[in-house]
Image (spheres, helix red, strand yellow):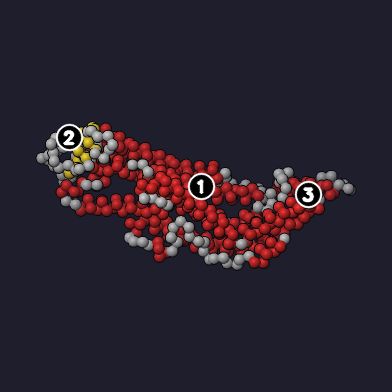
Amino acid sequence: MLMLAFLMVFSSEAYAQTLPSILVDMSRGECDRGPAMEHIFTSFVCHYQVTTVEVLSSVYFGMVEAFREPFYAALTLFVACTGAMYAFQIIDFSFKSIMVVLAKISIISGFAMYPELTIDILYTGLVGFINESTEIVIRTLGGTRGLSDVPSIFSWMDERVGEFLKLQGEANEAEGAARCDNNILALLFTLAVTVPPFFTIGVYVMVQFAMVFVRTVLGYLLAMTGIMFLITLAPLYFGFALFNTTKTLFDKWVAMLLGFAMQIFIVFAFIATMLSLPFDDKIKGILDSVKPYDKIVYHDGQRLDYNNWCTLCAPESGTASLKESIGCTGTAITPTNMAVGGSQDMVKYMTKELLSLAILAYIASQVLSLAPSLATSIGGGGVGIMMSARLPMEGRLTQMGNGFLANSRSGRFLEGARDGFTGFLRGGGSGGS
């Protein structure tokens, strides 16, 4: 009991006023690294996490103080009930059982009312483990792209958005043949005029990949928010761990923590796997199939006839005005960035490349949709607790009362009391305290 007394007297009043930073720079000054559109994902994640940490830190330290007295009351009840169980010989009075009870009191009291332990082990330890394990997967699968950790993936997303805006801006301002270089809008408009089904697939691919980026960021932020919010409730749920009757609530709390942690790992492990695929070459090959339109050189047809703008790759044989990365002969296309050389029919090539990107985007979307349920299964618990209209302890209290009343004639009162305490504290014979 000396350890319990020490914790009750010397519990930290204020370990810190904010939870520590883990995965991203947590200073507001470091969140602003340049123009907002060039660092949209990194900046948003950083600002969101800073705000969340500031708010939940205040809630956490406030809850530690608010639940100090109720927790001590629950602890006193636990000690009294345990003493009664020893007195009624419900549990054996042995050195081993006493040490188990003392260890339970000390550990739960330390985590519930000593913020250093909760922050260092639950927050820093759990999130640090997520970070380290995710880094290993990202470095293994995404090393060819220079990816090393979660922030590097957000930076990669920022680079893709910045590259798209830059190329599109340059293409819109360009003159002559350069107006069709790496021009995604030109590709979409040309596909809409030449082969409308390709336009539909192209829009689907763009929307799906954009949603993959957005859902990755939101999934990470929601999981981190869930972890931090559950940790702020630690003083309450550690009190539930004292009694077997309420221990199921504590078990659910632990399962939700693990579920949110696994969700982060699963999402970024899959994103790293997806980024290891050479889909950049497919996108580049499709963009290179858009050429400037020239009435002298090109056939009529397969073109966007607006201000003599752009067309799909279909020039006459012998044309010299071609890009180095792709060659065209009649209606055939020769992508030199592919491992297998030789010309292919333009429609077949575009069908294969666009459909492969569409399938990849669909798989990515489905995996991100399944990540929460998969993380829940691995974590061993539900993502939420379905609260019943009845109080969780109502059945136990009834059981305890029936134990007192059963066989309560003279000489049987102690036996009935013992049965009542056993049903209440053990939860219907589920084990000791």
Circle 3: element type: loop
Give the x, y percent position of residue 392. Answer: 66, 48
Local crowd size for mark 1, using a 10 Å CA cut-off: few (<14), some (14–19), many (≥20):
many
Give the x, y percent position of residue 111. Answer: 62, 58
Give the x, y percent position of residue 129. Answer: 51, 52
- 27, above or below 150, in the image: below
Q: Residue at x 55, y 48 (%)?
A: 258
- 251, above or below 66, in the image: above
Give the x, y percent position of residue 91. Answer: 77, 49
Q: Which residue is mark 1?
A: 262
Q: Please give left or right for residue 327 compared with residue 265 in the image.
A: left
Circle 2: element type: strand
Q: Earlier in the sequence, mark 2 or mark 3?
A: 3
- Residue nearer the viewer, 215 or 329: 329
- The answer for how far apart the CA atoms under marks 2 and 3 are is 91 Å
Label for residue 32? none
Label for residue 329? 2
Q: Nearer the viewer, mark 1 or mark 3?
A: 3
Q: Please give left or right for residue 70 compared with residue 32 in the image.
A: right
Q: Amino acid at mark 1?
A: Met
Local crowd size for mark 3, using a 10 Å CA cut-off: few (<14), some (14–19), many (≥20):
some
Q: Which residue is mark 3?
A: 92
Q: Earlier in the sequence, mark 1 or mark 2?
A: 1
Report if residue 169 is visible in the image: yes
